[in-house]
Amino acid sequence: MKNYAGPVSDHFDGERFFDPDGVPPKSLGDLLRWPVRPGSAAAGVARMGASPHADTPPARFAGDKVRLSFVGHASWLIQTAGLNNPD
């Protein structure tokens, strides 16, 4: 099934994306084993558990100040003047 077609580049052959360094894609089995493989970063995160410093942001944050909440990876919730802006 063809989902995308575009110009050929160093990592796209016109129909499929690929790793220009030649590393083959992982199998579905590799993907499913990744979080539990001993020594993997994902296994370490699972052992860490929840942060004792985590909090739940309020539904609304009023006033002229700004409240930032780290959501995860590269996401923040910005709250001010009764508005929520997930960035």
Image (spheres, rainbow, N blue to C red):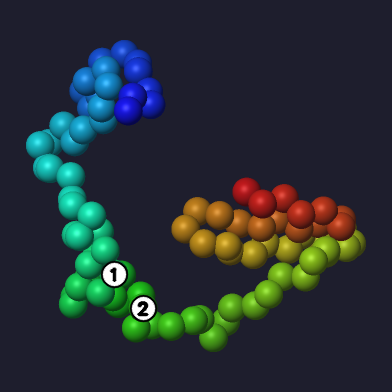
Q: Which mark is residue 20?
A: none
Mark sitting earlier along the chain (2/1): 1
Give neighbour class at mark 1: few <14, some 14-19, many 20+ (Cα, 10 Å). Answer: some
The residue lying furthest to the right in this view is 63
Secondary structure type for disc 1: helix
Q: Where residue 5 appears, x then y in whole percent?
A: 35, 18
User: Residue at 30% of width from left, 77% of height from top?
Assistant: 44
Q: Using residue 28 as the reference point, say whether residue 58 is left or right of it.
A: right
User: Residue at 18% of width from left, 50% of height from top?
Assistant: 26
The residue lying furthest to the bottom in this view is 52
Q: Nearer the viewer, residue 71 or 34?
A: 34
Give neighbour class at mark 2: few <14, some 14-19, many 20+ (Cα, 10 Å). Answer: few
User: Residue at 62% of width from left, 48% of height from top?
Assistant: 87
Q: Where residue 59 appears, x then y in whole percent?
A: 79, 66
The residue lying furthest to the left in this view is 22
State how many labels appear: 2
Secondary structure type for disc 2: helix
User: Label 1 near label 2: C-beta < 8 Å?
Assistant: yes
Q: Using residue 79 as the reference point, say whether residue 55 is left or right of it.
A: left
- One can see residue 41 in this view: no
**Label 2 amino acid?**
Ala
Real-space Cα distance between discs 2 and 1? 8 Å
**Label 1 amino acid?**
Pro
- One can see residue 56 in this view: yes
Q: Where residue 65 appears, x then y in whole percent?
A: 82, 61
Q: Which residue is mark 2?
A: 46
> Residue 80 sits in which quadrant?
bottom right
Q: Using residue 75 as the reference point, say whether residue 29 is left or right of it.
A: left
User: Residue at 26% of width from left, 30% of height from top?
Assistant: 17
Q: Which residue is mark 1?
A: 35
Q: Using residue 37 as the reference point, say whether residue 59 is left or right of it.
A: right
